[in-house]
Image (cartoon, coloured by chain):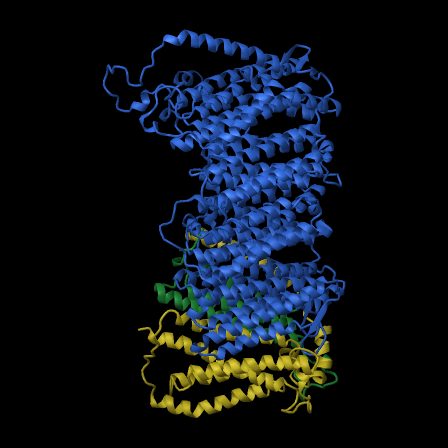
Amino acid sequence: MKYLGLEYITVIAGFLLLIVGLWGIISQKNIIKMIISFSIIDTSIHLLLVAIGFIRNRTAPIIDSSVDKLKAADQITDPLPQALVLTAIVIGIGITGLMLTYALKLYRQNKSLEINQYKSLKW
Amino acid sequence: MVNPIYIIAILLGSAFLIGLFQKKEKGLAGILSVLALAFAVFVSVSWFIHFTSGQQEVLQIFTGGARPPFAINLQMGLEESLFTMVINVLGLLGFIYLYRDFREEGIKGSVIFLVLMMAMNVLIMTRDIFNIFVFLEVASIATAGLLYLKKDFRSSAAGFKYLIAVGVISSFLLIGIGFFYLHSGTLNIDTYLQSNPTAVKGISMAIFLILIAIILELKPFPANGWALDVYQAAHPGISAMISSGTATASIYLLYKLLPLSSNDWTPYLIAIGLITFVGSNILGIAQKNGNRLLGYSSIGQIGFMLTILGLAPRLGEHFHFIFLSIFISHFLAKAGLFWISGIVQKQNIKEWSVLRKNSLLLFMFGFFILTLIGFPPFPSFYGKWQLIMELAQQRFFILIVAILAGSFFEGLYLFRWFGKVMKGEEEKENSLVIKWEKILPPVLFTIFAVIASYFLNNASEYGHSLNLIPIYFIILLFLLDFLPAWIKNSLVITAMVIYSVRLYPLIADDSLRLIFAGIFMLGGILTLFAGYSIKGKRAGFFPFAVMMYAGLMGLIEAENLFQFFFSWELMTLGSYILILRGKKSLIHAFNYMLFSLGGAYLIFIGIALSYFGHHSMDLNILSSSTMPGWSYSLLAIGFLTKTAALGLHIWLPGAHAEAESDVSPMVSGILLKGGVFGLILLFLLMGAEQSEQHTLLYVLGWLGALTALVGNLLAVFQEDAKRLLAYSSVGNLGYILFALAFMTNVGWLTALTYSINHFLFKTLLFLAIGGVVMRVKTHKMYEMGGLIKQMPWSFIAVLIGIITLAGIPPLAGYAGKWLFYNAVITKGWYFQGALVFFSGTIAFLYCFKLIYSIFLGQPKDKFRKVKEVPIWYIIPQAVLIIGIMIFSARPDLILKPLGNMLAQSNYFPTDPLSWENVTASTNLGYWSGYKIMLVIGVMFVILLLWLMLMSRKAQKIKQFNIVYAGERPFKPETTHFSHNMFSHYYKALGFLSLPLATGFWNGVNSVTHQVADSTRRIYTGNGQTYIIHILIYILIVYMLMF
Amino acid sequence: MKILKNSILLVLLGFMTWMLFNLYKDYDSRDTLNDTARYYAEKGPDETGAANLVTSVVVTYRGLDTLGEVTILFLVSAIIGLLLKTENGTRKTAMRASSEFMITAAKLLIPMISLIGVYIFVNGHLTPGGGFQGGAILASTFILLLISISRNKIGHKVLELTEALSGLSFVLIGILGVILAAGFLDNKILGTGTFGSLLSAGAIPIIYSLIGLKVGAELSTIILELNQVQGKED
């Protein structure tokens, strides 16, 4: 058994949320709930990415009074995954927004938010 | 050179700039977009030229002021320049195509389009994994956004399903990227590859997630329902971008990322690709919606490319050629077809027959369909050939079978579609709305495909050995199609004469080839003469007639198997279109194509099997096949589809009977000999020494005998004159097969005599009957009768024809029979011989029916005024009759050199015919065509004189100089003597004519359809099901791999 | 039937968990920076002049990603406009008027919140935060504006103009990087200045400000589009 530090908890939580999100996407018939599930998946990935960049007992990658500029490499966590998370969040927002728009459009056209009402394209 | 980063900057900058524009400036927005896209084309083309003109050094483009792996870098090399070039060209043309839609639906559409193009360019050039993720998302969002062009709610539903599916896929991609960074410490592809990666479990799994996500983006069967819905729902102009553009970028991504993995993806990619290729194409069979069908085909083709990608390590230096050939065909054809779909604006493929209103569109449609199927000389043919041969060399026989099966299914639905467009029910609407910007892109892509074919032909291993002059001539004929028919006919006849003259010295020593060349060329010229009787343009006839004859001549000239197969396919294609031209021949031409396609693929496999272990494509490698049983059987079955052996014959009667009057003799008298020539070539090269060959020949002998019996029997029961002749051809080809299978000197002489005879009399009969049918406008014999007065010449021609056919002395048919008895007795195949003899007797029955029902008996009222057939039908008939006479009187002119050749060239040295002037003799007896002719001639004259003497006092009676005793029957034609003429024979032998073969093939057909129809129900249309498919797909591949 | 379906889903998710567990098994916490991160830590401050290393990565080293990101928001706002526009031509909002409390509070808060937003993206190279965060805060003022004072004062046009101009400038600065410095989106087209001061880190503050404005405008557009459609619903 590994030592259960913050990063491990984050990774486990990330994976669990991922499963929860996947469950929601494949089992919830309501389109809005599906979109929420998608957001949960998104969040779980952000957690994973943050955990990947985390190093115990270190501070944020900003050179200020608490970080010595010359010894920064030994004092800060990895800045790259944090940058990736930032990008991923924005992309997630974009996709979620678009999904919601489609949901809105579907609802306005058909007055239904059940995914299994939209099966006219098949086979 | 312009830095490729400007492609991105300009495309994105223009997109932002257009965001500033107001509605009234939409013209300006359009111009700006076109300029930006043209700039992208310019940059990528200039780099492509730069790299193809010998420059090797790959350009690295750095961003962010640091070197990789710390900053993102892009790369521009030969591959990148090629792929950005094709994508940008597609983008420019795709935008022009959509221009009007964007104008009408708001200028923001062009913003999305420009961003999509930018994203695809980055995807191809970038070397950073996370950057790939970002721009994949950009591309997906842009694609989902472009669905707005179609306003029905189905496209919104498709858009939502697409977004959810892509969202889940990219989540896995992002997890993979995160863990990749965790384990490797970099996001840069090149840095990782240089760091001598070791297979840590963690990183291999991360890479697995990345690769599987990219593969899922490529829509593998069956986890691709979301993509199919988009293909169906999107505006066709957008589907073109997805199918040709996004897919191209994704497959290049996969190619770029594959080296990351230390796992061997080869078997997985091959399996994924093949399952997708075969699966999609099977499902396509049951599909009626044009756009969705194109989606299936698209996915199938991408699967095929995945397979090739997986095979890359095995294909070595040939990989690039093969991949490019398949890729470029898919790229051009699929975009072109989607664009045409946008012009047609029809859902059901039946309604696509509206394309007939515009010959340019029709031509392009056919062109793209054939490009997809891979007929020569279309680009994908070269790659497919090379691929199959390489696979054979490495003993991947199962792969060959799977690939060709997938291709066959694809051919099946594409040809069905093609047929419906060409011959389906006429659409009521008056015209297609065609705007210039919609027609320009497919036209350019057609031209690009022609150029691609040219380059691929030059680059292919055996392409330089091809004789391309006929192909150029065919292209010329397409361009000259606006001329009147008689000019084009003269042009073609002249060309064929010139060609024959040029060819003669090359094959003068080879009597075998000379005979077949004579049949093909002389027959071609003669049958073309009949075409002079047709007024107007006869659009689209001559290119395909030439294509068929060029294919036939190519068979003769072929020095290697590549040329042979190329010509074989060319011949098939040309003849298919000729047959399709008939009024009611839609289903028959389709059957013909299916059997031909299947046969061609069997031949293909046969060639591949023979090629195994050799290093040349020479024809001689057939004589040393390492798998004789398989390769010879497959080749033989392949050729037998063309000669319509029993079981494979069901396409023939309809195809020959329903063809146009002058096409029937072409495809019957002449085209069938192509198959015979193939068999002869095969038998000569394979020899009869080994036990496998013995068995094969024995089986073929039986098959020939049974074909003869059933073919002739079925001919007897026909009421349709042309169908009767067609069935008779089946029987005659059975004789030829039977005699060839002897593999003795006399046996082969028999077969060749039969071939020559069949050519002469069947061409003659089809011309004569075709002429009659043209005049009386019916095929039914009991509706004719008494035409001898109106058409005395046709009567004589048919008389001569049936005398030859039935083998009655003194004409050449008898020569065949005499040789045949000798051969049977020498060989000792008595029982089969008896069967064939019996079927020869049956031939008398239908010969009688033919001449009696049509020309003798009571003339019908409505045909009292019909005229003799046109002179253009009579001329070739006269020539053929002269040919029959010469061959009957002096068979030695042809048979002697032929026999000598067979004897001397070590093929069949034993028991030849010995000739003394015009008398041939064997151990069993002698025969002289000349003397028989004299004797019979004298007898005929004496009898004729005697008859005239006796009938001096005879009184001529008018037709109605009789007394009616009963009442008038309800259906007078049923009382006609020749209606159901041989019903009493049917009671006795009818069981032999049950349509067993037809039933069998119908069964195969319906099973295939049912499988397709039930399998495609996995695409329930529910977005969640699609996600479940994706998850299961990931898990299965994961479990197989780890 | 439902039980069957649910148990299939359960099995599927079970396998999924097992697959992810295998991924987790190989996860180990890190105790050092890898080469890439070490480079950012050691060379980053001097190369880019930014104290916030995440910002230096986001804006400079991985500037192309950020460009893609901004493009995504831009795309989404454009697409939403198109998708919702094609459906109904007329747009009318039919919300009831805001209360006096709301309006007063908004008048008080909007300038302050805006100021915070601007502060966050201007100082993106020094302190936590940056263009995206600042932009999001700016957009939140817009929401406030929308639900309190006025629905039409800040029109579409202003937002579109901000969006397009800032995007265009972003690309132009990127191109300047090719011409004046070492490559696309290189921030050293301006001097790096004194480390830790507001006017330092080359073009980063400018780029981040542009991003802030752009993100703010884009998110606002999205909200506006969705709001207008919602308003029509009865």
Q: Please state the horizontal and vertical placement of residue B252, each as a whole percent of the image.
A: 63, 60
Residue B438 in view here: yes
Residue B1020 lies, with reference to residue A17, above or below; the image says above
Q: Please state the horizontal and vertical placement of residue B196, each as a whole percent of the image.
A: 76, 63
**B970 lies left or right of B706:** left
Front one among A122 and B241? B241
Residue C125 lies, with reference to residue B310, above or below; the image says below
Q: How many marks?
A: 0
Q: Please state the horizontal and vertical placement of residue B242, each as a whole percent of the image.
A: 53, 60
Residue B606 in view here: no
* Residue under the point 51% across and 11% down: B941
Q: Which tint is chain C?
A: yellow
Residue C158 lies, with reference to residue C90, above or below; the image says below
Q: Which tint is chain A?
A: green
Q: Which tint is chain B?
A: blue
- Is the N terminus of chain A in the top left, top right, bottom left or bottom right quadrant? bottom right
* Residue under the point 69% across and 28% down: B511
Q: Please state the horizontal and vertical placement of residue B293, each as a whole percent of the image.
A: 48, 51
Front one among B261 and B638? B638
**B590 lies left or right of B857:** right
**B146 lies left or right of B448:** left
Front one among A64 and C173? C173
